[in-house]
Amino acid sequence: MQNHKYDVVVIGGGVVGTAILRALSFYQLKLLLIEKQPDVCEGTSKANSGIVHTGFDAKPGTVEAECLRRSRRLWPMLVENLRIPFIPCGAVMVATNEEEKQIIETTYVPQAKANDVDVYWMSAEEILEMNPAVTTKVTGGLAVPGEAICDPFWATRAFGEIAVLNGAEVVLGHGVSHIETVPDGEDLRLTLENGGTVTTRYAVNAAGLWSDEIARMVGEESFSISPRKGQFILTEEAISISSIILPVPTKTSKGVLVSPVVFGGFLLGPTAEDQEDKWDRSTSEAGMESVLAGCEKLVPDTRQFSTIRQFAGVRAVCSEGDFVIRPSAVQPRMIHAAGIRSTGLSASPGIAELVAETLQKAGLELQANEQAQHTLPDLFSEEQDTGEIICLCRSITRSEIVHSLKRPLTPQTIDGVKRRTGATLGECQGNCCIPKIIDVMAETYPDQTGKQPLKGVKNSYLAVVQGEKQA
C-alpha cells in the first residue's frame, strides 16, 4: 500500500475504532481502518465484562457521561440492525451494611438523576427473590433496570462489517509507526510498520492503550495513558442470579461483580491493578484470590464454582480523568478518541457520533451515502447447512466455521474463528476441535494474496499451543 489517499483513516480496531468507522461509512467518504493486531477487538475490547452500562454512575458533565447518554438512545437500533447478542437483564448495586447504603443514597442516586437514568431502591427481600444466590447480609440495593449485557466481539465485528459493506477498507496486522504532515500542509502521511504509506485528509486516533503514543507522533503530549489490568474468572456453573450484581464502588474501581454472560455462564471480576506494561495480560494466583474474595461478599458460594477459564484485560487510565475527544492542539487534522476507560463498549456508539460531529467542525464535509446499508444482512441464509459437529463442547457445526471464514471481516487466526463462532470455548478449550478448525480453514481460504493461505493459521496454532504472544 503506497500513498493511497483517504478522507479519514481510523487508527485502532477496537470497539471504539470500528464504531467510528461504521458511523462515517454512512457518508460519501473514502475510509480506512488500520489495526496492528491480526484481527479487530484484540485489545481492551475483547477482555471485559461485556456490560452495556447506562452511565447512571458517570460523573455528570463529563465527556464520558455525554457519550453514554447518546449511546442509550442508539443501542436499541444497533442491537436490532446488527443482530448483536444482547440481554437486558438489569443490574443491582448491592448494599451489605448501612455505610454502603448511605453511599448509594448520597452518591449514586443523585448521579443517576443528573444523568437522567431510571433507578429505584430494592429491599433485601426483593433482591433475594430475584437473585437467591446473593448474600443474606444484603440490606437492599439500587436497581438499574436499563443495564444489559452483550457480546463485545460481536459488536466490534458487526460495526466493522457494516462499514466494509458500505465501502470502507480495513488493514489488519500493520500498526502505524510514523505520522507526518505532507509539504502542502493539507494532508497527513502515515507510515505503517511494513513500510507502506497512507495519505489522508484526517486521522482519528482510536488506538486505546496506545493512543498517547499515536498523539506523540504528531508532537502532542497533552495526555498520557496508563494501563490497569483486570483479571476475570469465567464459570459455567448454574448461579441463581438473574441480574448483574454490582458492589458499591471504591475510589479506584467499580469493584468485582458477578454477571451473566450473553453466550452462557457467569463472569466474576475484574481486579484493578495499575501496572507499567501495556502488554501484560497475565493472570496470577493473587489476582484470582482477589476476584474470589470480592465476589464471595456478594455471592457466598463463589469459591465452590468450578472455573472454565481465567483471563485478564488491560484498560486505559487517562491522565485527564475523562474521555479525550477533540482535535489535536498540535495537528488539528488529527481527532483524538482517547482515554476511553472501562465504559468504552457502552459508550462506543456515542463516541462515534461525537467524533463525526468533531470532524465536521474541523472541516470535513459530510454528505449522506444514500447507498449505505444500515442493517447487517444474513449473508448465508440460502446456503445448505452442513451439520457435521466440529466443536463438540459448544455444538458448533462445520457450516458455522465456514460461514465465519466468509464474513466481510475475515478471521486470520484460530482466535478469530473462536470469537466469531464460540468454537474452542468449551470444557476442552480447543484440544479436540483446533485440528479440525485448521483443516476447515485450509479448505476454505482462497489464496488471493499469493502468500501461503495457512500462514496466519499456523502462527495462531503455535500461539495457542506454546502460549506465545502475537505481535
Image (cartoon, rainbow, N blue to C red):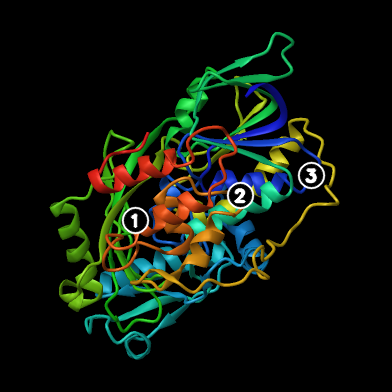
How far apart are the two marked residues, 3 and 2, measured between alpha carbons? 15 Å
* Element under disc 3: loop
Q: Amino acid at mark 2?
A: Gly
Q: Mark 2 or mark 3, which is nearer the start of the sequence?
A: 3
Residue at image mark 1 = 435
Q: Upstream in the sequence, badge 1 or badge 3?
A: 3
Residue kind at label 3, given as amino acid type:
Tyr
Which residue is pictured at 31% across the width and 84% down the height?
240
- The residue sitting at 81% across, 41% down in the picture is 28
Image point 56% across, 68% down: which residue?
Answer: 117
Mark found first going from the N terminus, 1 or 2: 2
Q: Say what secondary structure mark 1 lies in.
A: helix
Location of residue 259 in the rendering, given as x and y in whole percent from the top left corner: 36, 70
| Residue 208: % across, % down | 47, 39
Give the crowd class for mark 3: few <14, some 14-19, many >=20 residues within 10 Å.
some
Q: Give the residue pinned by disc 3.
A: 27
Q: Mark yes or no: residue 262 visible.
A: no
Q: CA distance from mark 1 to mark 3?
A: 43 Å
Q: Is residue 188 above or below residue 171?
A: above
Q: According to the image, label 2 marks what residue?
A: 160
Q: Quadrant of the C terminus?
A: top left
Which amino acid is tagged 1?
Pro
Q: Does residue 258 appear to the left or right of 71 in the view shown? A: left
